[in-house]
Image (cartoon, rainbow, N blue to C red):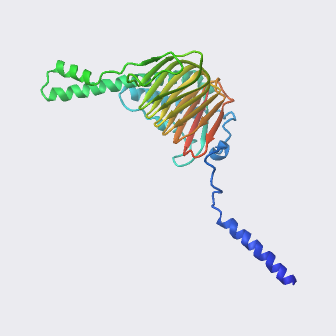
């Protein structure tokens, strides 16, 4: 009888062990509908002030200047090589790389300003490049140079910006790819464009503002928004350092270059984000959150 009981206990233990072995090595499947703890995913606490790191701060400043130079040479900037120092996780490895650039704050501010000025000039630079190429083709086909240039300009006429002064404008009218905003006393707003989009200016929404486009999104805003949501089926380049937005959610289907300031309490990275560079001005308390299902590989967080 005792032997039978001992065998039964051993058999139950073996069954339990077998069940444990059948569990996947990397644990149970993640609930993709719920928030996740980025400290577990990225391996560090993003809320902890990073240690001083002069070489990495210098590398970031150098990278911003390099991107500005590339744009000014009519090249596409090498955005996603920005995190290039040895502390940064290599491709395929997930992680947050914190950089303390407080000692180089003035240099970083100036470098970011040079980059943004170049980035803002990029659409017109691209248009002028297409005009030159078209004029050259027409000239090779025998069109007089003056006529070739005129026809090329007609073929690539600039699209005028759309000036928005109401919280919920009708965006279904004239074609546009740039919004210049001056909106006050808004409650909720959603601005959408079927293509690439740039949004700049002043906004005030007590509850929320959502910017959405089916291409790359550029945004530089000031003002106040309860929750600011940037969603793009491309990459996102945004400067939100001068906007009071307690909660910011960024959901690109690509890469992210973002600056935030002391007016942002929570930054949520969502969507199909691949790699992100987040520049944080004067805000050691920023909370970084993630959303399940994200395929982000690496995040560089630069504090100054």
Left or right relative to 86: residue 147: left
Nearest to the observer: residue 110 or residue 103:
110
Residue at the farthest left position: 142
Residue 287 seen from this side? yes
Residue at the farthest right position: 2
Left or right relative to 5: residue 44: left
In which quadrant of the rendered view does residue 87 lie?
A: top right
Nearest to the observer: residue 131 or residue 193:
193
Rendered position, 271 above or below 15: above
Where the N terminus falls, by quadrant?
Answer: bottom right
Residue 62 seen from this side? no
Q: Residue drawn at (62%, 40%), measured in percent from left and top?
A: 290
In which quadrant of the rendered view does residue 104 lie?
A: top right
Where the C terminus falls, by quadrant?
Answer: top right
In which quadrant of the rendered view does residue 249 lie?
A: top right
Left or right relative to 131: residue 211: right
Nearest to the observer: residue 143 or residue 29:
29
On the image, the x and y values in percent for residue 57 come to 57, 31
Left or right relative to 19: residue 259: left
Q: Residue drawn at (84%, 79%), measured in percent from left and top?
A: 5
On the image, the x and y values in percent for residue 6 come to 83, 79
On the image, the x and y values in percent for residue 145 come to 17, 20
On the image, the x and y values in percent for residue 211 come to 51, 28
């Amino acid at each position: 009888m005792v032997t039978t009981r001992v065998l039964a206990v051993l058999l139950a233990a073996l069954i339990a062990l077998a069940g444990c072995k059948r569990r996947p090595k990397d644990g149970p499947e993640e609930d993709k509908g719920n928030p996740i703890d980025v400290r577990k995913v990225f391996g560090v606490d993003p809320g902890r002030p990073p240690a001083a790191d002069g070489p990495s701060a210098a590398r970031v400043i150098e990278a911003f200047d390099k991107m500005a130079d590339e744009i000014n040479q009519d090249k596409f900037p090498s955005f996603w090589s920005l995190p290039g120092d040895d502390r940064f996780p290599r491709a395929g490895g997930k992680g947050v790389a914190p950089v303390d650039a407080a000692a180089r704050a003035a240099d970083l501010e100036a470098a970011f300003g040079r980059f943004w000025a170049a980035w803002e000039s990029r659409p017109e630079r691209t248009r002028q490049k297409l005009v030159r190429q078209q004029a050259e083709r027409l000239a090779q086909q025998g069109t007089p140079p003056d006529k070739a240039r005129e026809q090329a300009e007609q073929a690539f006429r600039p699209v005028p910006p759309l000036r928005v002064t109401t919280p919920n404008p009708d965006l279904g009218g004239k074609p546009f790819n740039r919004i210049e905003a001056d909106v006050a006393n808004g409650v909720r707003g959603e601005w959408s464009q079927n293509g690439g989009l740039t949004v700049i200016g002043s906004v005030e929404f007590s509850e929320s503002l959502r910017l959405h486009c089916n291409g790359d999104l550029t945004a530089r805003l000031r003002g106040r928004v309860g929750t600011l949501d940037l969603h793009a089926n491309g990459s996102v380049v945004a400067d939100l350092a001068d906007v009071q937005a307690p909660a910011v959610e960024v959901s690109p289907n690509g890469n992210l270059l973002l600056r935030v300031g002391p007016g942002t309490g929570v930054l949520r990275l969502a969507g199909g984000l691949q790699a992100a560079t987040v520049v944080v001005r004067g805000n050691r308390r920023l909370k970084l959150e993630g959303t399940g299902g994200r395929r982000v590989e690496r995040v560089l967080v630069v504090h100054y």
